[in-house]
């Protein structure tokens, strides 16, 4: 075994030597290498490893390299880019870079270079870009004879010498001496400084502690297009005057004078003299962010050149003043005045300037903050919102951005001067109620009114925005108003809408017809709301590409919505729906939904964030919807069986109890049935009152067919002929053609007493028992438990032969036995007649 490993080691060593060219660096393979480039950045290298011939790019940045040995790059004659930045290099020797004849780009910034041999760089004949920032060695002492740089990034330290200048670089286009990425400190710029850079196009002298810029500094630089003077806080906005003085002689396109204003300094006013020389320039873009500009002298804006397109003026404090009238003559197409009233960073150490400006701002319109009255002076005078606000806009302006401008208004009817506005971003303000309408914004395509605390949109707000395509109104409080818009009135006029973002609006529901006019909608975002059911229609949106209903409170998707989506998926294979981060349930009543997810998962976005909850609050990822569905189906079928079993069991016991109850009350039910039936048919009248009630018969005689002899011969004779009573017997008195049970019941009901002739035949006869029970019911339910039964025992019957309920009655109610002897008979009939007469 050991031998084998030894052989393996030897073998791999040989392989490494023969084929090891790819990993020629030491330590091997620490760096990532692609065919011709090697990235060795941040590898803690302390020295430059041996290198191969073929490389075109090497990155040694952020290591611990202390020196560049002679001829270390001797073989690298194809190397074009060498990054040695962020190391500990302290010396450039004569032969440090020898061999690098093709090198175009050399980055030496952020080292510790204190000595450079006079010929160290002159070998780099092809060099075009050099970065020498943040080294102690003075960049301006480098010997670059014979090198024709296009781009130079250097430190520029010469605070007390106004006569120093950059060495001759006849082809230099870009000069970056910005103090943001290097060390820059020049108190004064004069015509001397850039005079040997004839083709310069971009100069970046931001954060260079400049106090003065003399007239003539840029005058000879006819190809200058970009000039960045930002963050020279001692220059002040008034310093712009000497700059613009030279600009008509240049090709200036972009002028960057952001933040040339000190903390705790007076606010700025733009005067005519600041801008008057701009008229003859070719300026296109002006950056004047963070200068706390409050006032603009009327007429100053009229000096902006015709070429002017973009104005970046964020973090200022514009006040309403006379300049508003000039606005319609400003040629700009883009304006960004975001973050009005933003404060400067108070922790920033103020620069010490050579002079202190003591000029005071004219305070004619002072203290009128734009936030109070940007729109119109009426707003201030009245404190009420006028019904009509005219707003001046540069006629060619297409994009207007005022994010975080601290504007706090209701938006009433606004009339905007003739304009070409396409894009408005007024997010992060406090436009709390949008009444509108916004007149004459016919070209508007993009509106961002997010983060505005708005809780009200009127149905006419969007009335003029016929061409609106993108509407971003997320993070407001529109949940207060949108759910009430049953007929889709709010979005009635924006029929060309392609994207709408309604997220973060506390919406609980959106009505079915809310988007009825948005046929062209492509992207619909309603995430981060409180929807617990999707109730809006999207079947008409034939172009829908993305629907985001994530982060709501959906526990399921309703069948109707699933069907809508199903149809949409069929129509458009690229449609994606994001349903992630809701409260979906993976329970038995939601198994259809899980199945739906398992089928349509290719259309669902962010499925890895789509979870569902089991009954025991365990969460599952719906990426495994198929598996969840299978498990659920199994569980739920047994669950269903259990439910069915329970139902059957309950039904069984229920029916037993019910039939028990019915059995127990069978007589009552039958009695009531017949009574009601008879009443309904009119056979019996509703009794007026039990006491005063007139009975048709004095008695109803219940007897068995076999005992009819006794009844017909004896009983009828004795009661009717001799006693003068009127009795009812079925043979004679029943109404023919009527149901016998109904006949019995109604006859009993209209008789005062019921005489039961009990014999063995009686007990065996069905109809006799029926009559007996009906009579019993009659006494209980119609006669207030008055005893109406009277039993005649025709034969001797042993108590054992009697049914229990008759026996009970016998015990506490009257009965009489038929005596069958002369004297007894007389007494018997007497007693019977007496009973009946009562
Ligand atoms: C470099 O050294 C630092 C500190 O010694 C260490 O934290 C880091 O992980 C090392 N990086 C590499 C790539 O070895
Ligand atoms: C070298 O690598 C660093 C760190 O990855 C990177 O920032 C730098 O841009 C790279 N240099 C070049 C010239 O690509
Ligand atoms: C700069 O280098 C060139 C050779 O490339 C040499 O002739 C010249 O004297 C050097 N200049 C200085 C000031 O060292
Ligand atoms: C200013 O710089 C020039 C050119 O490098 C040099 O001749 C002069 O001595 C410097 N003056 C001072 C005061 O440092
Ligand atoms: C000027 O240089 C700084 C630092 O390199 C950079 O941040 C800034 O964007 C540059 N300005 C322009 C206009 O490119
Ligand atoms: C400015 O650039 C143009 C074309 O890019 C060139 O023709 C012209 O000579 C340049 N001007 C100077 C002073 O180099
Ligand atoms: C403007 O330039 C003149 C000389 O051309 C100079 O005296 C003045 O100090 C400069 N002003 C500023 C603010 O730099
Ligand atoms: C602009 O140029 C025109 C013609 O070249 C000239 O008459 C006018 O005085 C210039 N305006 C300014 C402000 O320099
Ligand atoms: C607006 O643009 C038109 C055509 O491009 C131009 O004629 C007009 O002068 C511009 N208006 C302003 C105020 O620049
Ligand atoms: C409010 O402004 C309107 C229009 O300028 C004016 O007619 C009305 O008098 C003002 N109301 C008050 C109370 O100042
Ligand atoms: C959800 O909305 C649909 C469509 O309006 C409706 O049919 C369904 O009953 C609703 N579901 C719930 C749980 O409210
Ligand atoms: C919840 O139920 C699932 C399956 O029914 C089971 O795997 C899981 O362990 C249960 N979780 C808890 C916390 O009981």
Image: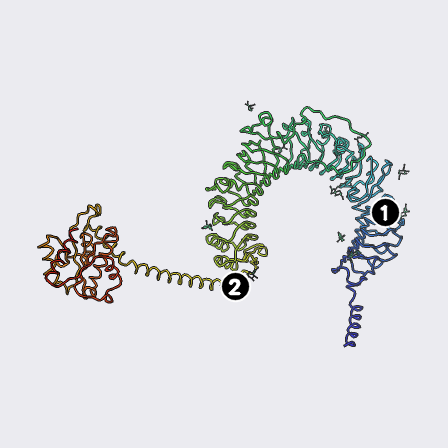
Question: Residue 655 in the image: x percent, y percent?
Answer: 35, 61
Q: Nearer the viewer, mark 2 or mark 1?
A: 2
Q: Residue furthest left?
A: 721
Question: Residue 684 in the image: x percent, y percent?
Answer: 19, 50
Q: Is residue 369 left or right of residue 209?
A: left
Examine the image and state in which quarter residue 368 appears.
top right
Residue under circle 1? Answer: 144
Secondary-structure class at tag 2: helix
How crowded pointer 2 is (Cα within 10 Å; few <14, some 14-19, many 20+) is rated as few
Q: Is mark 1 within 8 Å of ligand 3?
A: yes
Question: Residue 138 in the image: x percent, y percent?
Answer: 86, 44
Residue plotted at (45% across, 62% down): 640
First along the sequence among labels 2 and 1: 1
Secondary-structure class at tag 1: loop
Q: Is mark 2 within 8 Å of ligand 12?
A: yes
Residue under circle 2? Answer: 631
Disc number placed over residue 592 in the picture, else none: none
Q: CA distance from mark 2 to mark 1?
A: 76 Å
Question: Residue 585 in the image: x percent, y percent?
Answer: 52, 56
Q: In the displayed structure, would residue 459 be above or below residue 85?
A: above
Q: In the displayed structure, would residue 600 be above or below residue 202?
A: below
């Amino acid at each position: 075994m050991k031998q084998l490993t030894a052989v393996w080691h030897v073998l791999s060593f040989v392989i490494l030597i023969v084929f090891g060219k790819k990993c020629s660096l030491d330590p091997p393979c620490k760096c990532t290498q692609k065919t011709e480039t090697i990235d060795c950045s941040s590898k803690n290298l302390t020295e430059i490893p041996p290198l191969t011939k073929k490389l075109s790019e090497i990155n040694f940045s952020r290591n611990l390299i202390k020196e560049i040995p002679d001829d270390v790059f001797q073989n690298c004659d194809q190397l074009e880019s060498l990054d040695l930045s962020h190391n500990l290099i302290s010396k450039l020797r004569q032969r440090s870079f020898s061999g690098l004849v093709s090198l175009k780009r050399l980055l030496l910034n952020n080292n510790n270079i204190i000595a450079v041999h006079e010929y160290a760089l002159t070998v780099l004949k092809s060099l075009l870009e050099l970065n020498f920032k943040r080294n102690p060695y003075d960049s301006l002492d480098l010997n670059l004879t014979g090198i024709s740089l296009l781009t130079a990034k250097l430190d520029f330290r010469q605070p007390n010498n106004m006569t120093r200048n950059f060495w001759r670089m006849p082809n230099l286009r870009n000069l970056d001496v910005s103090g943001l990425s290097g060390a820059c400190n020049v108190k004064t710029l004069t015509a001397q400084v850039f005079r040997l850079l004839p083709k310069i196009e971009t100069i970046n002298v931001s954060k260079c502690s400049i106090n003065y810029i003399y007239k003539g500094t840029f005058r000879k630089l006819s190809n200058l297009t970009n000039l960045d003077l930002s963050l020279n806080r001692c220059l002040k906005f008034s310093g712009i005057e000497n700059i613009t003085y030279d600009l008509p002689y240049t090709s200036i396109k972009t002028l960057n004078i952001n933040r040339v204003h000190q903390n705790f300094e007076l606010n700025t006013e733009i005067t005519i003299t600041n801008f008057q020389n701009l008229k003859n320039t070719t300026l296109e873009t002006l950056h004047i962010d963070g200068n706390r500009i409050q006032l603009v002298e009327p007429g100053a804006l009229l000096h902006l050149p015709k070429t002017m397109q973009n104005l970046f003026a964020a973090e200022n404090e514009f006040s309403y003043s006379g300049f508003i009238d000039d606005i319609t003559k400003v040629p700009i197409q883009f304006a960004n005045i975001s973050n009005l009233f933003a404060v400067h960073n108070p922790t920033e150490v103020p620069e010490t300037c050579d002079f202190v400006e003591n000029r005071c701002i004219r305070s004619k319109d002072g203290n009128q903050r734009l936030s109070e009255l940007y729109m119109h002076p009426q707003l201030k005078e009245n404190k009420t919102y006028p019904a009509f606000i005219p707003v001046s806009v540069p006629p060619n302006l297409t994009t207007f951005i005022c994010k975080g401008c601290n504007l706090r208004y209701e938006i009433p009817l606004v009339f905007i001067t003739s304009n070409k506005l396409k894009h408005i971003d007024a997010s992060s303000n406090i436009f709390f109620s949008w009444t509108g309408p916004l007149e004459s914004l016919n070209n508007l395509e993009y509106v961002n009114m997010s983060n505005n605390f708005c809780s009200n949109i009127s149905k006419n707000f969007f009335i003029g925005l016929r061409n609106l395509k993108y509407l971003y109104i997320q993070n407001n409080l529109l949940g207060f108003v949108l759910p009430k818009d049953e007929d889709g009135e709010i979005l009635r006029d924006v029929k060309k809408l392609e994207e709408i973002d309604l997220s973060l609006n506390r919406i609980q529901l959106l009505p079915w017809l809310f988007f009825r006019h948005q046929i062209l909608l492509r992207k619909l975002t309603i995430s981060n709301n409180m929807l617990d059911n999707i109730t809006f229609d999207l079947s008409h949106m034939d172009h829908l590409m993305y629907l985001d209903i994530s982060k709501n409170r959906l526990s399921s998707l309703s069948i109707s919505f699933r069907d809508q989506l199903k149809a949409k998926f069929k129509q458009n294979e690229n449609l994606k729906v994001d349903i992630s981060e809701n409260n979906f349930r993976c329970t038995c009543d939601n198994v259809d939904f899980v199945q739906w997810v398992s089928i349509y998962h290719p259309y669902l976005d962010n499925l890895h964030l789509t979870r569902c909850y089991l009954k025991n609050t365990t969460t599952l990822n719906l990426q495994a919807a198929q598996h969840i569905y299978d498990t659920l189906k199994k569980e739920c079928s047994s669950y269903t069986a259990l439910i069915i079993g329970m139902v059957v069991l309950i039904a069984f016991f229920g029916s037993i109890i019910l039939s028990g109850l019915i059995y127990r009350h069978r007589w009552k039910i039958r009695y009531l049935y017949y009574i009601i039936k008879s009443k309904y048919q009119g056979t019996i009248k509703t009794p007026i009152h039990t006491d005063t009630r007139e009975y048709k018969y004095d008695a109803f005689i219940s007897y068995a067919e076999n005992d009819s002899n006794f009844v017909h011969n004896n009983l009828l004779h004795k009661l009717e002929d001799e006693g003068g009573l009127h009795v009812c017997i079925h043979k004679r008195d029943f109404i023919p053609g009527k149901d016998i049970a109904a006949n019995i019941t109604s006859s009993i009901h209209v008789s005062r007493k019921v005489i039961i002739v009990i014999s063995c035949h009686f007990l065996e006869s069905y109809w006799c028992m029926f009559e007996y029970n009906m009579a019993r019911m009659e006494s209980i339910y119609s006669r207030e438990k008055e005893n109406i039964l009277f039993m005649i025992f025709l034969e001797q019957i042993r108590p054992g032969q009697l049914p229990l309920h008759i026996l009970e009655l016998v015990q506490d109610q009257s009965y009489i036995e038929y005596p069958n002897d002369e004297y007894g008979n007389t007494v018997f009939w007497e007693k019977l007649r007496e009973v009946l007469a009562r």
